[in-house]
Image: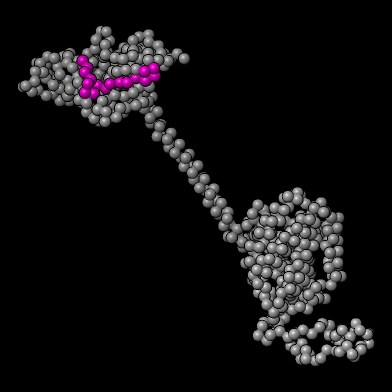
Amino acid sequence: MTGPLGALRASAVLAIAALATLLQVSLAPHLAWRGVGPDLALLVVVAAGLAWGAHSGLLLGFGAGVVLDLVPPADHLVGRWALALMVVGYVAGRVRADLRPDRRPALGTIVATAAACSFVGTSVFALSGLVLGDATTGVGGLLGVILASVVWDVALAVLLVPVLLRALARLEPEHAR
Amino acid sequence: MTVLDLRPRSPEPPERPGRPGPGGRDDARRPREGRRRPVRLPRPATGRGWGDDREPTPPRSLVVALVLAAASLMALDAAGALAPVRGAVAAVAGPAESAVSAVARPLTAAPDWVRSQGALRDDVARLRSENDALRGRLAAAPYASNRLREYDGLSRLTGRLGYAVVPAHVVGIGPAQSFADTVTLDAGSAAGLRPDLTVVNAQGLVGRVLSVTRSTATVLLVTDADSVVGGRVGTTMDVGTLRGRGEVGPHGLLDLELVDRDATPARDDAVVTWGSQGRGPYVAGVPIGRVTKVVSSVRETAQRAEIEPYVDFGALDLVGVVVPDGTRGDRGVIEADGTLVPGEAR
């Protein structure tokens, strides 16, 4: 049982997350600033959390994280992005719980959520690397990377998340009826 | 769907505390069996449903399970157990990535295009400068061969004349505005030069040295209005004086006035320097030019002939300064027999 997620929605979001992961590994490096590119998969999880709440966000974050952990250029321990994106989905879902249920989130909310989620997600990933001895850079380098990725994610969230929210809304049961 | 399901039930009064359920007080708060959630207000009919709040917070057990799953994934991966999974995912994702890259190549090529614009511009600049350098060398090639020819001619001339010369290059030509036909040589007193030496080149007489510094010499060309050269018509041995006209331009003409009033130079007669034994300003026997026109006027007491110099004053480069035998300086001397005596190092 997928809980609040229908099998259709879960697979659709995971497909989107997989596509985002592919774009992230093959397209984003060309846009990267000092190697730091946008986290597209993270933004998909943020959108899912904002659309459907913490429970869905948690599950989808885990799934998308595992995908991100396994897709080829990844060399870190599997499960690190799963943990991080799980937290991201949860945080975004909590933001969703505080919004009016019948309204789409405002752009300011989206930006704030994306910034917070990006910071939390990249930090969790980086800290897990530090704890597990999987990281190669020092704390100072990590901070720079985290801040750069927050800037990237906020910039892309303004463009992407509203589109994603609209797409996810089409998966709503009410709409599909 | 849920909205419609809930609507007919919502007016139904919730269970009152006064009616005790089977489980006591806690059960009294719980909705009736089959209703897992509290009743909420219906949404506005106009609003398109945005999400639903079926489970605002995930159950703690799920969080724990997922965290443990992540941790066990890490542990499995650390133990190397996930290598086949990675390989399977890579087998699928690899082609997908290359497909995405292929589709996105026009996009990703854009910054590369901008970068390569800069690189290409650098290339163009580098090639252009290289091209300029090569073109300069190419342009200098005839100059170099001409110089060789001039050295050849100069050494032949010295052999013919029987004088030793110091080779020098014209490095500066006085501007036409100064109305003096003077040039600067790159040899001076250090090379054994002094004023009043004859300056020749492979074609003939160039002028004489006016003044020298340590490393340069100023030469008055024979075409200058102040220049007076004793000349002799080669065929008749008639003597006269050659004066420059001071004409601006490379093709200055000279006027020859013969001392002997009755002598008439023929056209195309060669005129050479008269010279003096003391090797005064001009040594003897240096070709000056040829007669192009003879003017005879009643009023004038002497014949006047126009002489076209052999030397092309517009293209002066290598010249030789006739020096006494045995002169030694910081540059080589072409001796009368055509041999080159190298200069002494300072």
> Where residue A22 sits in the image (x, y, percent)?
69, 62
On screen, B90 above or below A1?
A: above
Q: Colour mode?
A: one colour
Tell me if residue B96 can be seen: no
- The residue at the point 36 percent across, 23 percent down is B169
Left or right position of A65 against B75: left
- The residue at the point 37 percent across, 10 percent down is B327
Q: Return the residue nearer the eye: B251 or A89.
A: A89
So how many labels did they put on this image?
Answer: 0
* The image quarter in which residue B221 lies: top left
> Where residue B76 sits in the image (x, y, percent)?
85, 58
Left or right position of B157 against A78: left
- The residue at the point 66 percent across, 59 percent down is A151
Q: Return the residue nearer the eye: B31 or A161.
A: B31
Q: Is residue B27 magenta?
A: no
On screen, B99 above or below B324?
A: below
- The residue at the point 90 percent across, 82 percent down is B26
Q: Quadrant of the N terminus of chain B?
A: bottom right
* The image quarter in which residue B342 lies: top left
Q: Is residue B222 magenta?
A: yes
Q: Residue furthest left?
A: B298
> Where residue B196 sits in the image (x, y, percent)?
29, 14
Tell me if residue B215 can be seen: yes
Left or right position of A113 against B225: right
* The image quarter in which residue B7 lies: bottom right
- Give the magenta range: B213-230
> Where residue B241 sits in the image (x, y, percent)?
18, 17
On screen, A91 above or below B192?
A: below
